Image (cartoon, rainbow, N blue to C red):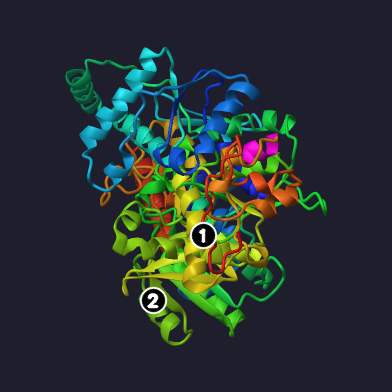
Amino acid sequence: MHTVIIIGGGPAGCEAAYQLASDGIQVHLIEKNNETGGNLNNWYQLFPDRKNAQDLNKRLQEQLNHPGITLHLGMEPSRVEKDGQGRFSVSLSDGSLLEGDALLVATGFKTFDAKRKEEYGYGIYENVVTSVDLENMFRNHAIRTSKGDVPRRIGIIHCVGSRDEKVCNFHCSKLCCITGVKQAIELREMLPESEIFCFYMDMRMFGPGYEEMYREAQEKYNIKFIRGRLSEAAENREHQVQVKVEDTLLGRPLRVTLDLMVLLVGMEASNETQGMARELGVKLAPSGFILPLDPHYGNNLTGEKGVFITGCCSAPMNLTDTLNDARSAAVCITRYLNMK
Amino acid sequence: MNLEGKQQVWKDYQKEIADDRYYYARSCIRQTFFPGSEWAYLDILKNKLGKDVLDDPRHTTCTGIGYHSDVVPVQTIMTVVARHFALMTEAGYENITPSCITSFGIYTEILETWAHHPEIEEQIREYLWKATGREFKKPKNLAHTSDIIYKFREDIAAQARYKLVDVHTGRQLRGVDHIGCHYAKMFPSKGIGGAEFPAVLSGMISSWGGDVVDYPERRHCCGFGFRQYLVMANRGYSVANSKKKFESMRPYEPDFIVANCPGCAMFLDKWQYTISEMEGTTYGQDGYGIPVLTYEELAGLVLGYDPWELGLQMHQVAVEPLLDKMGIAYDPEMKYRTKEGKDIGRPKCPTYLKV
């Protein structure tokens, strides 16, 4: 029986593990945290159907009960080696050793550290939060300012750490636009009296149902979308956030005072993704994510034989694409093992 | 506001500042409008801190105002700056310390340009040689003079005769720090604390006992902006920018403003008079304005220099309310007299602004 070692227990790693195990392959799934789910653990609802994120998470976790899957929680690979016969051995942080016939990297992404956009004041101004912080607020059903008040005016800032030469990120994180729309609707549902603004560069509604959701946000939920990039934020005496934006459709500067400012943080390759790329000698794209062998025919392949990739370690992708990518990786690996 | 967050930013933006032996580059504006400032700076460094500073009479304008107004071409300003470096080299110094923020920005920009384009540096070396027969070494260390005072702020605090505290109430005096745009907005890594939360002046205020006011328009330009001011038709724009800042800082009731750019200090001081004449609005207490100081003047006051020797009578906004709060003794009769007692004349009394 063939064995595959998967590094990373986020949605991609979990789904790939299940698909491979269902094909009769023995799987070792390594996850650094004490639970699987990765970034999904931080999310409240999913777009476009507003599914509870933890329902999906739970389903993915239940799949891991498959007898072909051995889960290694709270473990990190300390060393990865490949022998002359194409077999991999992975040393874990507890000193144990795993062996496999193929390696699947599913180490995912990290969210952009909003403190790097100093002018937005995250970590300094009391009422500046990230989209991840907001998801946590949603989960606790507590959307409040630092003083405990209901925010009357909320601004959502798109493209924080994405498409931004100043922070050396030229890539689009792809999901922030629809996340902003989803979060604006969720805010409206929880705070029907509040004014909600989205400040965007472009609205990139790439997935099925996204454009409709964007339209609904404007027509049904009265979210105000303003095309213009935030130039500066400052805190006033009431701890509100005073922002300066150029409305690039009207060609006018705007100054708006917000009770709560949400930064839609972009996606970057996780430290583990970059570390595995170095360890395995696979190439990185200029964005910092792992470069697939071919964008059309080899999106789960790397230049290293037996090393496969899946999910957001190669590019930002939504959960639909992530799960599809995991299934695609499982097909690639099964075919590779059958030809061995 | 989370001070720890700010402190982390300050840690991220520390720069190397030479410890001694400075070649001083005077400022066109500062030595014209605040002549006591440059004298005080040199006196503090030489006689209070025991540093070696060369005040070179051969040094000229950097032509920055002309450059930013599109009057002086970039090759010309680079050659003028190259001559400054040559004067520094000939005098045996390696650390250059401009008094002007525009000059500091110009020097930084030119050194960065040369670092990325060595062929331009070679061309400028050739121009300088042909024009003057001079050669130069690039400075080992470039720091603005406010960086130097920041570096030695605790030494100054140790010698302080007065603190930034209201002696009548014990309240910390509230200081607004205004950083010149060309200090760090172009090259954040060259400024202490970076461009967004600079610490160069706020660090002085804190070390000398004051409380720093962080208000929404803190980062906003004073409105000088060369073309705004030099083109008379644009001056309304310049005043409007200063007004925006005053309106934003007024609710915090600041006791003083300190600036590290000579142009900013001038406009924040003079425009208070202009706005009062235009609108009858004043921003200080009881009809006074908010006193505007250069950091050298602030250091001088803390160290116990005579306010009139520092040249504070040259300010448009009266500084007496601040002197009274700090408990600084001064002779009102000597405000408009030379040391020898000769009358130097006095400005006309504004319509609204109390002086």
Q: Amino acid at mark 2?
A: Gly
Residue at 39% across / 45% down in the picture? A168
Residue at 52% across / 22% down in the picture? B18
Q: Quadrant of residue A173?
A: bottom left
| Residue A215 spot, x, y in % from top left | 38, 81
Report the front residue among B336 and B160.
Answer: B336
Circle 2 packing at 10 Å, graded few (<14), some (14-19), many (20+), is few
Determine the main secondary structure of the stretch shown in magenta: helix
The chain to which mark 2 is attached is A
Report the front residue among A157 and A44.
Answer: A157
| Residue B77 spot, x, y in % from top left | 26, 34
Residue A209: image tag:
2
| Residue A213 spot, x, y in % from top left | 42, 78
Image height of A218 relative to B317, above or below: below
| Boundaries of the magenta span | B298-303
Report the front residue among A163 and B183.
Answer: B183
Q: Amino acid at mark 1?
A: Lys
Per the model, the C-alpha gap separating discs 2 and 1 is: 71 Å
Image height of A95 relative to B226, above or below: above
**Residue at the outermost bottom position:** A220
**Residue at the outermost front position:** B342
Q: Can residue A1 be seen from the camera position used here?
A: no
Q: Which element carries disc 2, helix, strand or loop? A: loop
* Screen quadrant of the C terminus of chain A: top left
The residue at which mark 1 appears reads as B348
| Side of A11 relative to A322 (left or right) | right
Total marks shown come to 2
